[in-house]
Amino acid sequence: MRELAEWLMARDDIAVFSHRAPDGDAAGSCIASALALRALGKRAAMFLPGGVPAYLDFLPFSDRVISDGIPPFPPKCALAVDVSSPELLGDNLKLFEACPERAVLDHHESNPMFGQLNVVRPERAATGEMVLELIRMLGVDLTKDMATCLFAAISSDTGHFNYSNTTAEALEAAADCVRAQADVDLITRRIYRTRTFARTKLLGLALSNASVECGVAYACVTNRMFQETGAARADTERIINYLIEIEGVRAAALFTEQEDGMTRVSLRSVAPYNVARDVALPLGGGGHERAAGITVPLPLDEAVRKVLKRIEEVL
Ligand code: 5GP
Ligand code: MN
């Protein structure tokens, strides 16, 4: 981390990237890193494929995040935060690769260390925790805006301090954000306690077609369901929690049909099953022990068969 801080201090015109379908950790870590670099007087631009989803638009400077790859200045170096593998940079991959110098700050065990400098800590609950550490090493004061972004990041990746990754360090980092005036009620209301009617209907459709077989719960979200409800792509986030929370279930999968005919798979498990290592990685995805994902280049029904077969073998 010290090496990364020194690396950044010696550079300027930095492009900060995070992953497609950005969640709170991706968007919060990306914005807070850029704000810290700007506090040092540097030029820093923020890139998120698809932009910040509507439910996270309370994040400060979320309207300044660039969704397509057109930078406001030619970046001299890149920092990828919370990006577990380069293809998750989406349409920004070319811009990232065009930067002559590239660093990676992440907490996914499956990260292939695709930067020239890599700080990867799987024991960290959120990349946001690592960004807080970086901000301290840069000698930058934690502002309310940065604290809001980082509390949202840590809250998102710990399921608001519910999941098994909720360490004392994660709680301490969140406490530091609250001391720096992060508004807990606003952040958690927008992330956990507000949903559009369209999202509510999508949740209902997905759950009404869910199945449980041999300890595995799964459900599908089709393109037709998006059309019927008017829900956004990001509205599938957390539907899978209802599947893994079913009593007796050991692993859960949510299959979302993509507009291009491929299938996005979200995976969750209970201890001791490791869905990143045993299911996602062998099928071309990645993630964490208990929360992983894959994009399978197959239509929905074939993706369901392939992934369920693999999960059953693992269980
Ligand atoms: P989610 O189910 O919330 O979309 O993703 C759960 C976790 O799996 C996240 O930490 C995410 O980074 C990881 N993940 C999801 N999809 C992919 C993927 O296609 N490739 C890789 N490498 N990781 C993924
Ligand atoms: Mn994360």
Image (spheres, rainbow, N blue to C red):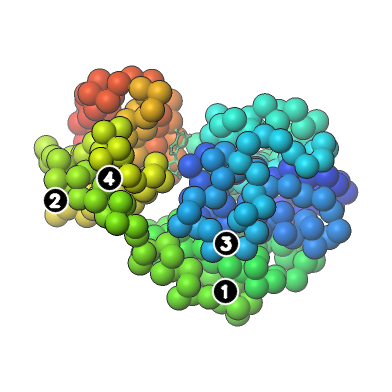
Task: Give the residue type that dot 3 points to.
Answer: Leu
The quadrant the C terminus occupies is top left
Rounded to the nearest whole Å, what is the CA distance between mark 1 and mark 4? 34 Å
Dot 4 crowding, Cα within 10 Å, few <14, some 14–19, many 20+: some
- Amino acid residing under circle 4: Thr
Q: Earlier in the sequence, mark 3 or mark 2?
A: 3
Cβ–Cβ below 8 Å for labels 4 and 2? no
Marking on residue 182: 1
Q: Which of the two discs, 3 and 2, sits closer to the camera?
A: 3
Secondary structure under badge 4? helix
Q: Residue at x 20, y 50 (%)?
A: 204
Residue 67 seen in the figure: yes
Q: Counting residues from the N terminus, which is met first, the one under dot 3 or under dot 4?
A: 3
Estimate the spatial distance between the alpha carbons at disc 2 and disc 1, rounded to whole Å. Answer: 37 Å
Q: Vertical placement of 111 versus 195: above or below?
A: above
In this view of the protein, which residue sits in the foreground, 241 or 49? 49
Residue 164, how many percent across, how many down? Answer: 37, 59
Q: Within the image, what quadrant is residue 79 found in?
A: top right
Circles 1, 3 touching at the beta carbon (< 8 Å): no
Helix or strand or loop: what does disc 2 sit on? loop
Read off the residue under disc 4: 229
Q: Which residue is mark 3?
A: 59
The picture quadrant where one finds residue 103 is top right
Q: Which residue is mark 2?
A: 248
